[in-house]
Amino acid sequence: MSENIFKRFRRYARYTFEYIFIEKPRGLDFSMRDTRLLSETNGIMHGYSKTDSAHIKEIFSKLTIDNSVKILDVGCGKGAFIRRACKEKFGAVGGIEYDKQTFDICKKNFERLKMSDKINIYNCDARDFPHYGDYNVFYFFNPFDKEIMDKVMDKIIDSRKEKIYIILHNPVAADVIEAHGGKMTERLYDKVKSYWTNIYEIA
């Protein structure tokens, strides 16, 4: 327990340093956690916490990335995962964010970086998103409860045109993905956050 507390403290200290000395002077905010939505929705929506860049790089090393691969971050928050995805050769990079305040931060981040033309971000409820069929890789960092995940997966499955991949970071809803036919192809450990990441294929 004490080791986990120390690792959490070290991570928060590093992210705070990055925000104050690297991001804030440039008008950016990718690093600061926001749990406001968690309390406002009584735990239905889970708020924002960034995935560490080194772990994202490890996830991408397990994918075959080319112009045919189009990735969507469902619950993209302030855009840390999307920012790293833009460094790869994906055919398209997109994100959905439910909370308007967080969405506005995300949008501002990419405007400041002059990267808005590289991404598509949407401020909407993931259950109502109409463009799942445009993507074939979906990333989730535990953005909402299992009931919503089940409905989102129904929409993804109904709209898919080919084999798809589901990436779950902190895979609380793993059983939902498996119930929709997901077969796990990779399991990675994030040493920074002490979370597992599962990658599933749905053929």
Image (cartoon, rainbow, N blue to C red):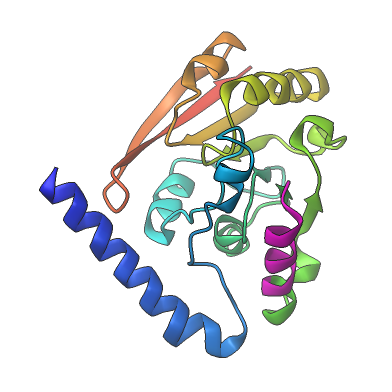
Q: Residue furthest bottom?
A: 25
Tell me where residue 147 appears, x and y as whole percent: 63, 20
Q: Residue furthest right?
A: 130
Tell me where the magenta segment starts and ends, as one range: 98-109
User: For this view, does 28 lie left or right of residue 154?
Assistant: left
User: For this view, does 112 lie left or right of residue 179?
Assistant: right
- The count of marks equals 0
* Residue 20 vertical placement versus 60 (above, below): below
Residue at (59% x, 34% y) in the render: 144
Q: Quadrant of the C terminus?
A: top right
Q: Residue furthest left?
A: 2
* Residue 159 vertical placement versus 99 (above, below): above
User: For this view, does 99 lie left or right of residue 52?
Assistant: right
* Residue 202 vertical placement versus 190 (above, below): above
Tell me where residue 3 appears, x and y as whole percent: 13, 50
Q: Is residue 67 magenta?
A: no
Front position in the image: 198 or 151: 151
Front position in the image: 68 or 82: 82
Work out whether residue 161 can be spotted.
no
Residue at (79% x, 34% y) in the render: 132
Residue at (56% x, 23% y) in the render: 201
Work out whether residue 73 can be spotted.
yes
Front position in the image: 162 or 151: 151
Tell me where residue 92 appears, x and y as whole percent: 74, 52
Residue at (77% x, 55% y) in the render: 121
Please name the predominant secondary structure of the magenta segment in the image: helix
Q: Quadrant of the N terminus?
A: top left
Tell me where residue 20 appears, x and y as whole percent: 45, 83
